[in-house]
């Protein structure tokens, strides 16, 4: 009994250490990448990222966790950030500017205690900018769907109404 309990605790510690190492490696990679882009004067491509404190301009917070072992300077909160601009976002707190809320729920395990753990489902208000422009060769369907089968005809012929009788040997 004691040996089994000890092994379970050892496994939990290993998972905790492994998770910490993976998070540390991820944060180190992000930090080095930011320095390389800043040194070369290249604008960094926007992608999902994790950082301590708050998300930078142009990003929305999609997750928060208290991580004082990783975030040692200042705010001990590790946040996950996604670039703003997608049609649908699921963010902690209220929706960013240009988005309207289409749903909400409380998920403190994902968003912490800020706003009571509120997770907002947000949709881009001006979706037209993400759709193809018909004057630039885009096609709107309908009515410009090309040639289609007559209604009720489908793509393949209908099955026979009666099954043929089995052939006798």
Image (cartoon, grey):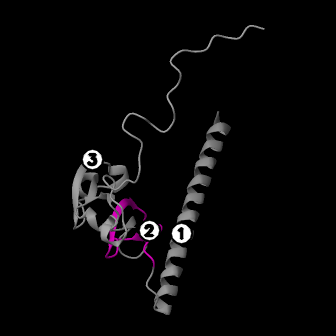
Q: Position of residue 122 (x, y in %)?
A: 27, 57
Q: Residue at x 37, y 50 (%)?
A: 109
Q: Residues within 10 Å of mark 3 (few under 14, many from 20)?
A: few
- Secondary element under disc 2, as helix, strand or loop, is strand
Residue 113 percent across, percent down from the top left: 28, 55
- Specify the segment rendered in magenta: 45-71
> Do the residues under discs 3 and 1 have CB atoms within 8 angstroms?
no
Residue 78 visible in this rendered orientation of the protein = no
State the image coordinates of residue 154 (x, y, percent, origin top left): 44, 36
Q: Say which residue label 3 marks.
A: 105
Residue carrying label 1: 26
Q: Nearer the viewer, residue 48 or 30?
A: 48
Q: CA distance from mark 3 to mark 2?
A: 23 Å
Which marked residue is nearer to the observer: mark 3 or mark 1?
3
Residue at 31% from the left image edge and 52% from the top image edge: 142
Q: Which residue is mark 2?
A: 50
Left or right? Give the position of 23 relative to 76. right
Disc 1/disc 2 C-alpha distance (Å): 8 Å
- In the rendered image of this protein, does residue 86 appear above or below residue 72? above
User: Which callout, 3 or 1, points at the residue further toward the start of the chain?
Assistant: 1
Question: For mark 1, does the 10 Å Cα neighbourhood hold few (<14), some (14 to 19), or many (20 or more) residues?
Answer: some
Choose between 164 and 30: the one closer to the eye: 164
Of 14 and 95, nearer the camera is: 95
């Amino acid at each position: 009994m004691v040996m089994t309990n000890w092994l379970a605790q050892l496994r939990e510690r290993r998972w905790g250490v492994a998770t910490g190492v993976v998070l540390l490696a991820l944060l180190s990679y992000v930090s080095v990448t930011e320095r390389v882009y800043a040194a070369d004067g290249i604008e960094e491509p926007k992608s999902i990222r994790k950082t301590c404190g708050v998300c930078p301009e142009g990003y929305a917070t999609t997750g928060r966790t208290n991580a004082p072992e990783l975030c040692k300077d200042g705010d001990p909160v590790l946040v996950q950030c996604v670039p703003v601009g997608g049609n649908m976002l699921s963010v902690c707190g209220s929706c960013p500017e240009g988005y309207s809320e289409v749903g909400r729920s409380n998920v403190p395990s994902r968003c912490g205690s800020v706003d009571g753990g509120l997770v907002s489902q947000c949709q881009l208000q001006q979706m037209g900018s993400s759709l193809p422009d018909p004057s630039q060769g885009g096609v709107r369907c309908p009515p410009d769907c090309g040639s289609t089968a007559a209604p009720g005809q489908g793509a393949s012929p209908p099955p026979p109404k009666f099954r043929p009788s089995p052939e006798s040997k």
